[in-house]
Image (cartoon, rainbow, N blue to C red):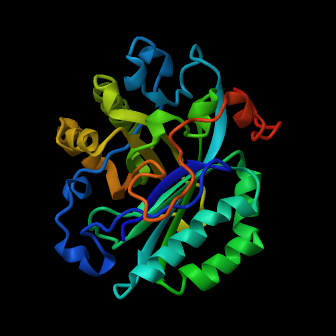
Amino acid sequence: MGFAMQCPISICVPHRFPQSSFHPSTLNSSKSIHIQHQFPISFPPYHSNRFKSAPKNHRMIVLSSSNPHSQRKRKVVEHVCLLKAKQDLSEDEENDMLDHLYTTQYQMGGVVAISIGRVSAPNPDHCTHALFMRFQKKQNLEMFYQNPFYLKVLKDHVITYCHGLINVDYESEVEDEMLSIFRKGEEFNHGVEFVLLISFNEDAFGNQSEHALASLSEMLLESPSLIVQFTQGLNFNPSSEEYTHAVVIRFRSVEAFEIFINSKYKDIWLSKFQPIVHKSLSVHFSVDPVGIGSTTTRASNDEPPCVGDLVGQVDREFTVY
């Protein structure tokens, strides 16, 4: 049974989707896209005000921490957990693990958005599932790691089924708009969640890495219809020091993801990134609207709540920049 979901807090509930052809026990035989492991990607801050002229349904919601003239921004803290499930993981065990991870958002404050799913293609590190969570601030993330409910979920419903985890955390900024902050609305109801972990060589920090990121951003600015939102930042999680940067991108569709994978970014990666990158890992998983393809009736995420309801969920200390 496939499993992928995305939803901000207190809006929808965990949901399963029909079985796909991919299973942890068949990683080596998967026919899913493999290209992303050959040409990983990374993204520098973008300028969100450059996309005001784009059609409403093709608007890219992006961060722009380097643009002093852009719209107001809010700082957010992103958490990525890549899981390495055991090969003999059963369907029931998989659903138990993902259900419990998903419900951790209801046991603590400060969780802004979440998505979780089964990785769609094999990867060198044998990661089988991915969890993305957005927090209001670092203190919320620290409380998350220490939360008794989360620790119990890890012990009883995750470690039991997995032989390894990769946790990466980073600070970033998003547009100061409720739908963007909470990853809510029609544009976030479906698509592909893409996670990239990257490590630049020590001697590449500065001009070389910035030039590589700028070259890639130039290419991406030519095709804003492919991406809904992305964030990137320096990893500050000591348990995964081998990765210096992390990126999370929501593509509009599988087709948009494939277009990007087969675009000229491969040339940019080979010429700008590969010479200065020590290590990289990328995974992706599909996200569908809650309520589509369900085996049981669950709350739908089709209609966004009013902005006023979302504002009430934001911590008053959530700093505006």
Residue 174 point in image, percent of width and height: 58, 33
Q: What residue is at 52 percent from the left and 76 percent from the top?
A: 97
Assign the C terminus to one quadrant of the image: top right
Residue 177 point in image, percent of width and height: 62, 27
In this rendering, position of residue 198 left or right of residue 179: left
Q: What residue is at 47 percent from the left and 34 percent from the top?
A: 186
Residue 188 point in image, percent of width and height: 47, 39
Q: Quadrant of residue 150?
A: bottom right
Q: Is residue 101 in view from this perspective?
A: yes
In this rendering, position of residue 261 left or right of residue 105: left
Q: Nearer the viewer, residue 166 or 122?
A: 122
In this rendering, position of residue 276 left or right of residue 113: left
Q: What residue is at 58 percent from the left and 68 percent from the top?
A: 101
Q: Is residue 200 in view from this perspective?
A: no
Residue ranking furthest to the right = 316
Q: How many marks?
A: 0
Rendered view: 22 above or below 155: above
Q: Nearer the viewer, residue 31 or 269?
A: 31
Q: What residue is at 17 percent from the left and 74 percent from the top?
A: 29
Q: Quadrant of residue 117?
A: bottom left
In this rendering, position of residue 227 left or right of residue 34: right
Assign the N terminus to one quadrant of the image: bottom left
Residue 61 point in image, percent of width and height: 48, 29
